[in-house]
Amino acid sequence: MNPGIASRVDQIFVILQHRIAELFPAVLQPWVAMILGVVGIVAVFPGIFALTTVLERKGLGRMQNRLGPNRVGPFGILQPIADAIKSLTKEDIVPRTADEVVHFLAPVVLVVAIFLGYAVLPVGRNMVLLKIDSGILFFFAIGASTELSIFMAGWSSRNKYSLLGAMRAVAQMISYEVPLLLAAVVAIMMTGSLSPTAIVRAQGGFTGFFPRWYVFTPWGFAGFVLFAIAALAETNRSPFDLPEGESELVAGYFTEYSGFKFALFFLGEYLGMMSIAGYGITLFLGGWGAPASFLEFIPSWAWFFAKLFLAIFFFIWLRGTLPRLRQDQLMNFAWKFMLPMTLLNLMVAAAWRFLGEWFGTGILAEGVRWLLCAAILAGAYVALALTLLRRQKIAARSYRYAD
């Protein structure tokens, strides 16, 4: 493809935004451009959420040898519209003893906080709403407020199941927020910047046909795996969906929600999943970068959303594959395995940097550095896993039958 045409296709949404903004007076143009960016975020990601609900239900149905939605529209593709109409028309039931103001604000705070996280997410070249140097810090700071909204929902419902579900959710999110943040720090360390755009650009370029993404380094691969596990727990996805344990807590912190408020919690959960997946892509998978040099003619935003859909498929696949953990297993895994591994990965990333300065450049020096760092992480993983398994004293299961 002609480079000029490829560049225009890549920047088509940026060009369209500028053309529309130019129709207004110069004083209003920055505000109009920002409003258009907000409209794009509010339109695109909820649209992906609607599509994801169909794909997840049909995908899980395929994995479990049953049918998914197939009645509303061709192949059930209009099921999200039917669900939205149902949510809007269902009666909004609020417990008589509930704190009505806090009960109403909880889902609103959750969705608003998650939408704010998209403001600094680069979804393509020159496609980010707020260009701030501390974008990653902004994302984690805003993400922490979702825990407040969940506790607001459980406390305001005046229901013991809701309160216990909220306390369980907050404990889980705080526990896994620590390794999530530490897993992201390695990418920040190697880039030397908190800007998501700078982190993506630092992963630009190719070695032959292959990209220089952080995930292709030992510390980057370990950081990506740890980030993905913590992201599952932060978004209450299987096998970490204990806040919604129907056998003990009914529906958890949103037990007393119905109608559109329940739909907001549902929307918030999926938007949070896509947001944290987008930052995982930004930190370790090159963001909007192409996976090979001969594929750079494809628009950058297309690569970002292709990676995002692969991440969503991975989340759906895990939900249909892994059973739910127990609460004690979940907390032990966070503090006894995830936290030590993320701290060790920080030291390995530092060693990677200094070994590169000591050994110099070259294929042999790069190979030695790669093997040393990979050996440290693999050895720590095996030693830690064996130690934790030994302490659990797992024995053969025995069965007893009634006389």
Image: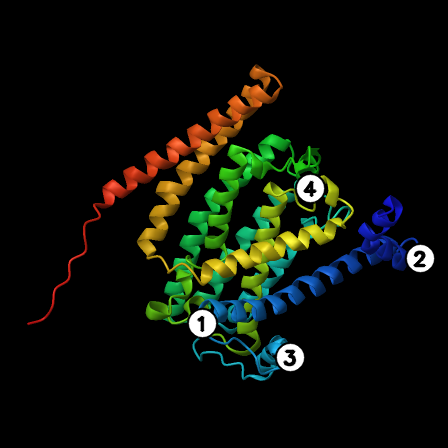
> Circle 3 — which element?
helix
Q: CA distance from mark 3 to mark 2?
A: 45 Å
Q: How is the image coloured?
A: rainbow
- Nearer to us in this view, 204 or 182: 204
**As shown in the figure, which amino acid type bears the numbered disc 1?**
Asn
Amino acid on which disc 4 is placed: Ala
**Mark 4 or 2: the one toward you:** 4
Where is mark 3, residue-wise? 74
Residue 33: x and y, percent?
A: 82, 56
**Image point 53% across, 73% down: which residue?**
262
Q: Residue at x 92, y 53 (%)?
A: 26
Q: How many numbered circles does the render carry?
A: 4
Q: Quadrant of the C terminus?
A: bottom left
- Residue at which label 2 appears: 25
Cα separation between marks 1 and 2: 59 Å
Residue 292, numbered circle? 4
Crowding at dot 1, Cα within 10 Å, few <14 / some 14-19 / many 20+, comes out as few
Front one among 51 and 368: 368
Position in image of residue 388 (x %, y %): 29, 41
Residue 229 visible within the image: yes
Q: Which residue is mark 1?
A: 65
Residue 101 visible? The answer is no
Tell me how far mark 4 sits from mark 2, CA to CA: 43 Å
Query: Are discs 4 and 1 less than 8 Å apart at CB?
Result: no
Q: Quadrant of residue 75?
A: bottom right
Dot 4: within a 10 Å radius of its alpha carbon, few (fewer than 14), some, or many (20 or more) residues?
some
Whether residue 310 sits left or right of residue 179 in the image: it is right
Q: Please say if the residues under marks 4 and 3 sit with CB atoms less than 8 Å apart.
A: no
Identity of the residue drawn at 60% across and 63% down: 111
